Image (spheres, rainbow, N blue to C red):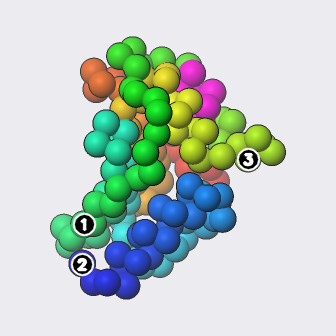
Amino acid sequence: MDAERIAIAKACLDAAHDGSLSFPEIIGQLVGAGFEGYTVDYRRNSQTFYLPDGGNVELAMPRSASTVAAVFDIARVESHVRWAQANEADYSYAAFCEKVKVAGCAGYLVSFLGRRVVYFGRTAETHVELFPR
């Protein structure tokens, strides 16, 4: 993985947490750099970005106080996703992360190729969200 791509991944991770870029803007930058997706792992507190050739970079996410709940509450996760998509005034990615962890989300996989996000719980239950058109 070259230094420029690592820097882009890091800048996108930071922008998500500080609110300086929206989800669509982050996707645009990552796709432009050749990434095909990424995984957020709340239990490892990390985010891994993937290239088509198998290259990847794992970056640490900012620490958080919440832990992943044992039960995956799909309705609550979906509600938090809708809140994020609405981009309301009280939205922040850090708050979203806290809320979905409390709802039992252990992480999620973003596929640019599949245009979807797969949220998963500790028991491998899943909730799939397609990218809005």
| Residue under the point 57% across and 44% down | 94
In the picture shown, does residue 105 fall above or below 87? above
Choose the circle earlier in sequence order: 1 or 3. Answer: 1
The residue tagged with tag 2: helix, strand or loop?
loop
Residue 35 vs residue 85: left or right?
Answer: left
Tell me which secondary structure the magenta stretch mostly adopts: helix
Q: Which is more toward the observer, 74 or 67?
A: 67
Say whether marks 2 and 1 touch (CB < 8 Å): yes
The amino acid type found where label 2 is placed reads: Met
Residue at the spot 71% in from the left edge and 43% down from the top edge: 91
Q: Earlier in the sequence, mark 3 or mark 2?
A: 2
Residue 21 lies in what quarter of the image? Answer: bottom right
Report the disc number at residue 39: none
Nearest the camera: 37 or 58? 58
Q: Is residue 45 visible?
A: yes
Work out how far the residue at label 3 is from the one at label 2, CA to CA, in angstroms. 33 Å
Magenta stretch containing residue 78, yes or no? yes
Q: Which residues are magenta?
A: 76-81
Q: Which mark is residue 87?
A: 3
Q: Earlier in the sequence, mark 2 or mark 1?
A: 2
Residue 29, horizontal then vertical, whole percent: 52, 74
Mark 3 is on which residue type?
A: Asn
Between the residue at mark 1 and the residue at mark 3, the CA separation in whole angstroms equals 29 Å
Seen at 45% across and 51% down, the residue is 62
Give the residue at mark 1: 56
Q: Residues within 10 Å of mark 2 (few under 14, many from 20)?
A: few
